[in-house]
Image (cartoon, rainbow, N blue to C red):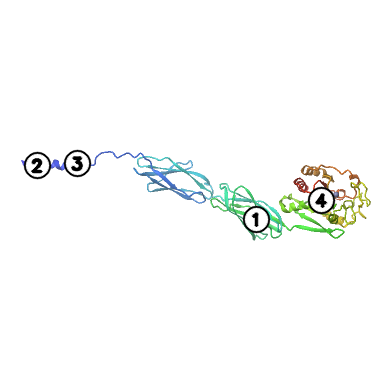
Amino acid sequence: MRKSRLVPVAFAALLCALLPAVPAAAAAPADSTPPATTCQAPSGWQRAPFTVRFAASDAESGVAATWAALDDGPALEVGGAAGAAIDIPAPADHAFDGVHTLSYYSSDVAGNSEAAHTIAVKVDTTGPATAVKAAVGYVSRAVTLRYRVADELSPKASAVTLVVTDGAGQAVSSLSLGSRRTGTWYGARWTPPAAGVFRYSVAAQDLAGNGEAAAGSATIDVERLATVTIGSSYLGRAITVTQFGAGSRRLLIVGGVHGNESGTAVAGQFTAYLLAHPAALPSGARIDVIACANPDGYARHLRGNARNVDLNRNLPTANWRRKLSALNEPGGSDLTGGAAPGSEPETKALLAYLRGGFSVVVSLHSRAGILDCAGPGALALGRRLSVLCGLPLSKLWYDPYITGSLGRYVPERYHVPIVTVELASARLGSGMRAALLAAAE
Ligand SMILES: [Zn+2]
């Protein structure tokens, strides 16, 4: 009987011992906090494919997945708790060049998703293209070489280098120009060592490190500055001409036929301007400047030459006269038109040079402040020059008494226009400079 009672008690005790070991059905605390995701991406422009890596954490239910989308594309699962990454393409056909938006987020096991983060990823597989402009210059005188680096995506280019090669393709100069803004024209100064045709090109890198996609190159025509002696004065002073350019439209500027006027000063200033600004020469033009056609008169500050001949009355025109009218210039003078038409050495030098053939002649005198035009087309040309320099078209009041002048000789002998400029100033202003350049166009 004792035993029969004992068994149920022992069984109940066994049950009591076992029951606490059974898991209780009590609920765990709910996870309402989404994961946090960070990413590692290379900064700046990239020219090769690269990988953006994500690190997500979730303290409660744990990371389930990380999602990423490029631009407006669908969000794709790119990994989970063990790590996530997305490959950014950079195809050689440049199809993915540009700034892209990469958005990403993670979700946890409990189903929470964090708000999407966005970063910009920049892909540039296209190198910069440089443009350059043809240049002209003179030996030993610095010339400005123009260049521009173009790049669709980079606002700046680095490692800009300008290389000059000679006619045999050998590099003769290399200039490191540092970094430059793209899309902007710059100028680099270069001093040609010799005459000849050189070429220059500019190379650069964009911000992604792409090299040149298209390197522009252009010629530099370097001339020896041609100052040629075309004769000498009665007292043996050289008469020289400075020649600019090699175009077929030839302008001859003659200054200082009268040694006491401003023509030599203005012609000299114009020569200095062309030396400093070779590119100002109109294309297709050649400009020859005889700054001082009467060096003896210039040295003595006299109108005539050393033989008292008015050189602008000595040319072999139909109306040449040895004895000049008292009205041939204001106040008259004791000058003559020379012993014969073209008798003077200065006139002979000028006549010989004119035989080279010119499209237009500009003769610089002073100081009446007018433009006197003669010859075919001279009026239209004079009107253009008048607008530029501000001097009116007119004739000197004593024009009917002038004999043997260059203004009459050039159209009479060569049928080309001549503009006799009666300067109002010994300074070459921008207007007169523009007019002289326009005469060569
Ligand atoms: Zn004069």
Label 3 crowd (10 A; few <14 / some 14-19 / many >=20)? few
Dot 4 beta carbon under 8 Å from ligand 1: yes
Residue closest to the eye, 334 or 315: 334
Q: Residue furthest right?
A: 323
Give the label on residue 200, or none.
1
Which residue corresponds to mark 2? 6
Q: Is residue 418 visible?
A: no
Under circle 1, the secondary element is strand
Residue closest to the eye, 338 or 74: 338
The residue that appears at 89% across and 45% down in the rendered structure is 399
Does residue 307 sit above or below 436 in this rendering?
A: below
Q: Earlier in the sequence, mark 1 or mark 4?
A: 1
Under circle 4, the secondary element is helix
The residue that appears at 69% across and 56% down in the rendered structure is 142
Q: Amino acid at mark 4?
A: Gly
Label 3 with label 4: CB-CB less than 8 Å = no
Residue 296, located in which quarter of the rendered image?
bottom right
Left or right of residue 302, residue 20 in this image = left
Give the label on residue 19, or none.
3
Measured in 3D between alpha carbons, the distance from the residue under mark 1 to the one under mark 2, in whole angstroms, is 114 Å
Quadrant location of the N terminus in the rendered image: top left
The residue that appears at 20% across and 42% down in the rendered structure is 20
Which residue corresponds to mark 4? 263
Q: Amino acid at mark 3?
A: Leu
Label 1 crowd (10 A; few <14 / some 14-19 / many >=20)? many
Left or right of residue 378, residue 58 in this image = left
Measured in 3D between alpha carbons, the distance from the residue under mark 1 to the one under mark 4, in whole angstroms, is 38 Å
Image position, residue 385 (x, y; %): 79, 44
